[in-house]
Amino acid sequence: MDQRYIRQVQLSEVGESGQQKLAEASVLVVGAGGLGCPILSYLAAAGAGRLGIVDPDTIDRSNLHRQLLYSEEDSGKNKAEIAKEKLVKINPTITVESFPVALTAQNYMALMQQYDIIVDGTDDIPTRYVLSDACLLLQKPLVFAALFKFEGQVSVFNYKEGPTYRCLFPDPPKEGDIPNCNEIGVLGVLPGLIGLFQATEVLKIILGLPGILSGKVLYYNVLTHQQRVFTIRRNETSIKEIMKLGKPLDVESQNCEIIPIISLTELKNETDILWIDIREPGEQPELSGPGVLHKPLSKLTESPLDLDPSSRMIFFCQSGLRSQQAVRVAQEQGMKHCLSLKEGAAVLKNWLTK
Amino acid sequence: MTYFGQLAEITGDHNEIIEISGASVHELKEVMKKKYPRLQQLSFVVAQDNQLLNENDKITGSQLDVFPPFSGG
């Protein structure tokens, strides 16, 4: 027996047979970001035999405070590729495969079918629905987690005919309603903690340990250390709908409204634009000047825009997510020419000063 | 009511009391949306006695937990 694993093999609940199960296991981690990094590190160290990493993104300096598989010199390189290099160094006895692509309703089959367990480390809601539907169709357990500021939610879906993500949240929120970490920020330790809950669930599934979070969702708040577990029921109607459809149900087409988005690259030196900053007071960088109006999203519904409905407005926020929501509200208030800026405030600030 | 995630920010509190009787989850949500217009755009679910409820379930207990999906990862 490899000394590497001796401390976990010593546990009577693991033993040499448990280590063998780990060696034979295959786990696909979708998203190698804040959640993905701790999940991958611990699964590699524990000797999970085959790990797959799916991530199309490149490493950005703003990732480094929480995505500890990456270092300064990795900036600009693909996350899946670099994570693979680092994991093989942590444990050269395992197999690691990298897929520098986004998982979609079109390619899920090719990516997922070679793996026993799927882990959700993504940061957007539409992909979470794709993963949930795909795992249901391929009959694979899905170890899920998601974050909001100081809180995390964790569950194991589709495990031994347990409920799915769609059973927990039957109505997909509209694009832009739920901010991600790039949008609102995150304390680096939160994905670390929550990612380790996911890694724990993966190990429990592989080793056949009790207490798997199937049919339950765990809520954890790192400020209060309050922990809650809620039970979820299977929604047979939604499960039958997906099985009948035979492919993941596109949540973006479920939500028929299309929010008009514009990129700075499509704009010239136009002067008649009213830039509407919908960020909350104190968000950085601050942006002011002629043609820039501050209207925090939290106040938009209660105190409607008092503007000429025919003015050309471009709404912006930190990353182009909340501004989509603002456009929807402004349209409801009768504004006719509202666009949501694809880029965030920092990029806009540079563009405006040029 | 105990609120999680963005709901605590929108309602300005983690806990509050809403008085209703014999309502369904759907009816409760309508009351909440009237009180907090920003909730109209949000998707959220309600749990009673640590058990998630469906839209048509009747509310019988006194302690409810309300939470939205999270996105970050």
Image (cartoon, coloured by chain):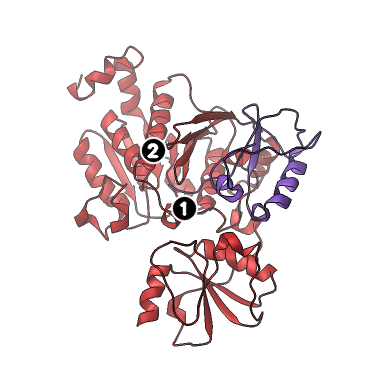
Q: Quadrant of the N terminus of chain A?
A: top left
Vertically, is B57 above or below A170? Answer: above
Instruction: Tell me how far mark 1 sits from mark 2, CA to CA.
Output: 16 Å
- Residue A95 placement, left or right of A118: left
Q: Which residue is mark 2?
A: A195
Q: Identify the residue shown where x is 35% and y is 23%.
A: A21
State the purple chain.
Answer: B
- Residue A280 placement, left or right of A238: left
- Residue A160 placement, left or right of A93: right
Q: Residue A134: give x, y in percent of width and height.
A: 53, 44
Question: Which comes before the other along the chain, label 1 or label 2?
Answer: 1
Q: Residue A79: give x, y in percent of width and height.
A: 31, 52
Q: Identify the residue shown where x is 29% and y is 29%.
A: A46
Task: Say which mark, if any, is on residue A88.
Answer: none
Q: Identify the residue shown where x is 63% and y is 58%.
A: A253
Query: Is residue A215 visible in the rendered structure shown here?
Result: no
Q: Colour of chain A?
A: red
Q: Which residue is mark 1?
A: A180
Q: Amino acid at mark 1?
A: Asn
